[in-house]
Image (tube, rainbow, N blue to C red):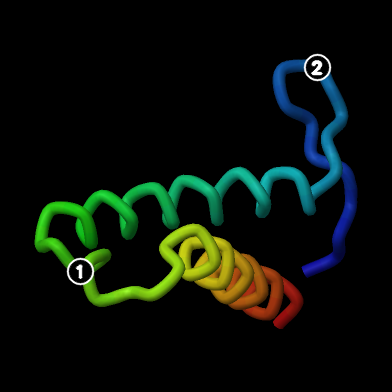
Amino acid sequence: MRFTEINLFGVYVAPMSVMLAAAWLIVVGLRRVATYFGLFRYIWHPALFVFSAYVIVLSSIVLLAAR
């Protein structure tokens, strides 16, 4: 895949911004699942954990898209 601009309703958007939004939506879903099952009480620093999960999901999306 070439990283070219995406035409989104007449506005050209960088593909990285679309990947950022997709990763954020995935992490929001993962955070809700973790909250539902009470997994955050076992995590020392929840904000750092969520940020780390976001970085992992975003890098995975970028690697899959560059393939």
- Left or right: 18 with respect to 1? left
Q: Nearer the viewer, residue 62 or 38?
A: 38
Residue 8 quadrant: top right
Q: Residue at x 85, y 65 (%)?
A: 2
Q: Residue at x 87, y 29 (%)?
A: 12
- Left or right: 59 with respect to 6? left
Which residue lies under the disc numbered 2? 10
Question: What x and y, as percent, mark residue 15?
Answer: 79, 50
Question: Which amino acid type is marked by label 2?
Answer: Gly
Q: Which mark is residue 2?
A: none
Question: Which amino acid type is marked by label 1?
Answer: Leu
Question: What x and y, as percent, mark residue 61?
Answer: 61, 69
- Left or right: 52 with respect to 35? right
Q: Residues within 10 Å of mark 2 (few under 14, many from 20)?
A: few
Task: Judge whether 61 appears above or below 23 on screen.
Answer: below
The single residue placed furthest to the front in the displayed view is 44
Distance between the alpha carbons at the discs numbered 1 and 2: 42 Å
Which residue lies under the disc numbered 1? 39
Q: Nearer the viewer, residue 27 or 14?
A: 27
Q: Residues within 10 Å of mark 1 (few under 14, many from 20)?
A: few
Say whether disc 1 or disc 2 marks the residue closer to the N-terminus: 2
Q: Nearer the viewer, residue 37 or 1?
A: 37
- Find numbered disc 1 in the image and state the secondary structure of the residue it sits on: helix
- Find numbered disc 2 in the image and state the secondary structure of the residue it sits on: loop
Residue 44 quadrant: bottom left
Count of marks overlaid on the render: 2
Question: What x and y, as percent, mark residue 24?
Answer: 53, 49
